[in-house]
Amino acid sequence: MRRLTLLLLICLSAALSAAGQTLSGTYVFARRDTCDLRLDIYEPVPGSVSADGPDRPSILFVFGGGFVSGRRDDAYFLPWFKLLTENGYRVISIDYRLGLKGVRMRFDPLHLIDAADKTKHAVDIGVEDVFSAVRYLSDHAAELGVDMGNIVIAGSSAGAMISLSSEWEICNGTPRTAVLPLDFNFVGVMSFAGAIMSDEGVPAYRSLAPCPQLLIHGTADGAVAYDKTAFGRRGMFGSSAIAEVLARNGYVYNIYRFKDHSHDMAANFIATWPEQRRFLEENVMGGNRRVIDAMVDDPAVPVMGNITLDDIY
């Protein structure tokens, strides 16, 4: 397996400062056979929330790294966490099990189904870990000050796949959702270069309408499908394919299709803050059924080096 060169470390981190970002606490939310899973909480900066304004959601963040690497507390994320807390948002960054670490992955035609099944398993255990984190937050909501009815889940790359799939499972009442508080749902999803792995064909939301979704993706992504890669009922359904399902059913979503960008949009947190902010303020806090489908060709958005599946595995 090639050593993964994390896109998150390619650029920007040297130019951005995380000074002043304060971690308020770290908590073990689950104990697995292989590891303990922890979450970090970053509180909003004092004075950043207006008493007369709408309640800002907590942002539950799931990091990326191809299911083989990554950390909840990677220094790369801190400037974005700082931006969020300065704007009044609590950030909760969580661990999850890396389901493909040490697993041989092959993507030739003879092994595509095997690769899809292994990736689906990695997503599934990631979803299980997200739900365990939600359960922990619910059990300790009073002491942590977390409003369980006001949580946005956000993820990058593999974390975005877990985030989108977590909402999909809630909307379909899968067995994994049994651990969640009664009638729990997120109030929004923010996906940076994500997709849904499905073995049931095109993803559908059968029991519950999904919460508003923000989909940010590069049209030339070589790691996570921008549209879809399907064979039989198995497939990876990316932001464009998900948006098609949401549009067809009248659900609320914002998709920003960054023209000719690759998997760098999994890491362009700061450059896409205006899109995030409008989504959070108008769709989530404002409750507006604002639908955006935009092709973006903006030279101000940094173009980072591409990363492909061969780079990861």
Image: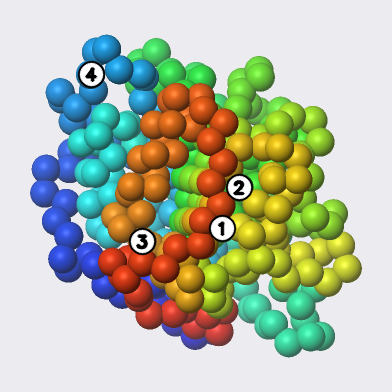
Towards the viewer: 107 or 185: 185
Residue in view at x 24 percent, y 67 percent: 12
Callout 2 touching callout 1 (CB < 8 Å): yes
Q: Which residue is mark 4?
A: 50
Q: Quadrant of the N terminus?
A: bottom right
- CA gap, disc 4 and disc 1: 33 Å
Q: Identify whether 104 is placed above or below 121.
A: below
The residue located at (36%, 18%) in the rendering is 54
Q: Is residue 263 above or below residue 60?
A: below
Task: Report if the CB atoms under discs 4 and 1 are less than 8 Å apart.
Answer: no
* Residue 133, above or below 13: above
Task: Name the residue nearer the viewer: 296 or 22.
Answer: 296
Amino acid type, label 3 = Asn
CA distance for labels 4 and 3: 28 Å
Alpha-carbon span between mark 2 and mark 4:
30 Å
Q: Is residue 18 left or right of residue 179?
A: left
Q: Which residue is label 1 attached to? A: 194
- The nearer-to-camera label among 2 and 4 is 4
Residue extending farthest right: 232
In this figure, what is the number of numbered marks?
Answer: 4
Does label 4 or label 3 sit earlier along the sequence?
Answer: 4
* Residue marked by disc 3: 268
> Between marks 3 and 1, how big is the CA–CA gap?
13 Å
Query: Which mark is on residue 164?
Result: 2
State how far apart marks 2 and 1 are (Cα).
7 Å
Q: Reading the chain from its start, which is encountered first: label 2 or label 4?
A: 4
**In contact (CB < 8 Å): disc 4 and disc 3:** no
Q: Earlier in the sequence, mark 4 or mark 1?
A: 4
Residue at the (65%, 28%) spot, across then down: 179
Q: Residue 41: horizontal and vertical position, in percent? A: 32, 35
User: Along the polypeptide, which appears first: circle 3 or circle 1?
Assistant: 1
Label 2 CA crowd tier, 10 Å (few <14, some 14–19, many 20+): many
